[in-house]
C-alpha cells in the first residue's frame, strides 16, 4: 500500500467521523471562498470569525459553569454513595466533552460567518425581489385582509410599541443565546450533538431561502404604514436605518459599505424559527423551559410584523424550517 493510499484511507475514516454540523461548516467555508473569489466585495471574514469564536468560547464557559453548579447542587443533598454516582456521570471529567465543545465552537464560528456575510451580500448573489409576491400571499392568508395591517391596528398603543421594541431588538438576542447555553448545559452526549445539528441546519436552510427568494420586508416596501408606530420604537428605527443603508448601497454598486447588521432578508423569519426549534427540543430540558419558549413564539411573530421586518408568511415558513431542521437533527445520531 502506497503512502498516498494510506493517507487517503485515513482521510476517509476521519471524514466519516464528522458530525453533520461539521460538514455544514466545511460547505460554508467553501461557499464563502467561492463568493469572495467571484464577487467585487471587500470585508474581513477572518475578523468576524474570530469575533464569533470568542463569543462562543464565552458561551461554552458559561455552559460549563452551569453544568458544574447543577451537579454541585445535586451533590449537596445526597448520600456519599449517591455522590459517587453523580461524579461518575459528570461530563466535564471526560475529554470527549471538551472535544465536542471545541468542535461546536469552531463550527458555529464558520457557519455563522458564512450565514451573516452571504446574507449581507444577497443583492450581489440574486438581484431579484419577491416582496410583491409576499404581500399577495399575506392577503391570501388573511382571507383578503392583510395580517400585517391587522396587527398594526390591533396593537396601536404607544406603550405596546415600546415593549415590542425592547422585545424584538434586545430580549430576542438574550433569549437566543440563553437557549444555546441551556441546551449545551442540559443535553448530554449525542442529544447535545443532535440539537446542534438541527440548530445549524436551521440557519443554513434559512440562508438558502434568503438567497433563492430575496425580499426586504414590509417596512422597506410600504414605509408609510409604519411611520406613526416607529416613532415609539427608537432602537428598531436605528437598526432599520443601517440595514437600509447597507442593502441600498450594495444595490447601487457601492460594495465597500461598512456592514454592521448584515443586510435585509425577510423570508423566512428565523427569529420565529429559533423559538420553534427551541420548543421542539425543550421537553428534554423541562416543562418550565418548554413553556418559556412556547410563549415567545407568538410574541416574536407579532413583533416581527409590528416592527415591519416580516410578513405573516415569513413566520409560518420559519416555523416549517425549524420543524424540518428538528427532524433532520433527530435522525442524524442515535441516543448513546
Image (cartoon, rainbow, N blue to C red):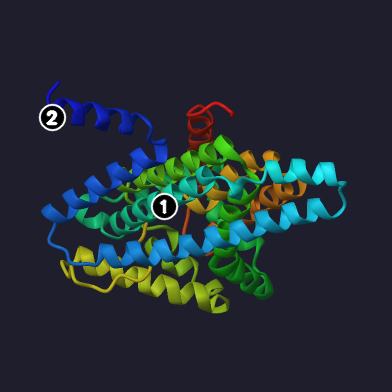
In the picture, measured across the screen, residue 335 lies left or right of residue 4, that is: right
Label count reads 2
Q: Residue 119: x, y in percent?
A: 32, 56
Residue corresponding to mark 2: 4
**Residue 108: mark:** 1
Question: Helix, strand or loop at disc 2?
Answer: helix
Residue at the (51%, 27%) spot, across then down: 331
The residues bearing labels 2 and 1 have C-alpha atoms spaced at a distance of 32 Å
Select label 2 or label 1 by which is in front.
2
Q: Give me the residue at 65% from left, 70% from top.
A: 163
| Residue situated in front as seen by the camera: 62 or 9 | 9
Quadrant of res 173: bottom right
Q: Quadrant of the N terminus?
A: top left
How far across and how far down the image is residue 144, in percent?
53, 43
Residue visible at 60% across and 48% down in the picture: 93
Relative horizontal placement of residue 58, taking residue 259 as reference (left or right): right
The residue lying toward the viewer, choosing from 37 and 324, is: 37
Left or right, 4 with respect to 91, comes to left
Q: Is residue 306 visible?
A: no
Q: Nearer the viewer, residue 334 or 251?
A: 334
Determine which quarter of the picture holds residue 72.
Answer: bottom right
Q: Residues within 10 Å of mark 1 (few under 14, many from 20)?
A: many
How far from the left and from the top, in percent, is residue 34?
17, 49
Residue 206 point in image, percent of width and height = 40, 45
Amino acid at each position: 500500500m502506497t503512502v498516498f493510499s494510506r493517507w487517503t484511507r485515513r482521510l476517509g475514516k476521519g471524514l466519516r467521523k464528522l458530525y453533520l454540523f461539521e460538514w455544514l461548516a466545511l460547505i460554508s467555508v467553501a461557499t464563502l471562498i467561492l463568493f469572495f473569489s467571484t464577487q467585487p466585495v471587500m470585508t474581513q471574514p477572518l475578523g468576524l470569525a474570530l469575533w464569533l469564536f470568542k463569543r462562543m468560547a464565552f458561551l461554552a464557559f458559561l455552559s460549563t459553569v452551569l453544568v458544574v453548579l447543577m451537579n454541585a447542587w445535586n451533590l449537596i443533598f445526597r448520600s456519599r454513595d449517591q455522590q459517587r454516582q453523580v461524579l461518575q456521570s459528570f461530563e466535564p471529567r471526560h475529554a470527549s466533552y471538551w472535544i465536542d465543545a471545541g468542535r461546536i465552537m469552531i463550527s458555529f464560528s464558520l457557519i455563522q460567518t458564512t450565514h451573516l456575510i452571504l446574507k449581507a451580500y444577497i443583492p450581489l448573489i440574486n438581484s431579484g425581489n419577491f416582496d410583491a409576491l409576499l404581500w399577495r400571499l399575506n392577503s391570501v392568508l388573511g382571507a383578503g385582509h392583510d395580517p400585517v395591517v391587522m396587527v398594526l391596528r390591533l396593537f396601536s398603543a404607544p406603550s405596546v410599541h415600546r415593549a415590542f421594541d425592547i422585545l424584538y431588538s434586545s430580549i430576542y438576542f438574550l433569549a437566543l443565546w440563553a437557549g444555546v447555553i441551556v441546551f449545551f448545559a442540559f443535553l448530554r452526549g449525542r442529544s447535545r450533538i443532535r440539537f446542534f445539528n438541527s440548530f445549524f441546519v436551521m440557519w443554513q436552510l434559512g440562508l438558502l431561502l434568503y438567497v433563492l427568494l430575496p425580499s426586504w420586508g414590509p417596512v422597506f416596501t410600504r414605509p408609510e404604514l409604519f411611520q406613526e408606530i416607529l416613532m415609539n420604537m427608537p432602537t428598531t428605527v436605528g437598526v432599520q436605518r443601517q440595514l437600509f443603508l447597507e442593502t441600498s448601497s450594495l444595490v447601487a454598486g457601492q460594495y465597500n459599505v461598512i456592514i454592521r447588521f448584515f443586510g435585509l432578508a425577510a423570508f423566512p423569519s428565523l427569529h420565529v424559527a429559533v423559538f420553534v426549534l427551541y420548543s421542539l427540543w425543550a421537553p428534554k430540558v423541562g416543562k418550565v423551559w418548554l413553556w418559556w419558549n412556547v410563549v415567545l413564539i407568538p410574541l416574536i411573530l407579532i413583533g416581527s410584523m409590528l416592527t415591519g421586518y416580516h410578513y405573516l408568511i415569513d413566520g409560518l415558513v420559519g416555523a416549517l424550517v425549524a420543524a424540518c431542521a428538528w427532524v433532520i437533527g433527530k435522525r442524524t445520531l442515535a441516543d448513546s
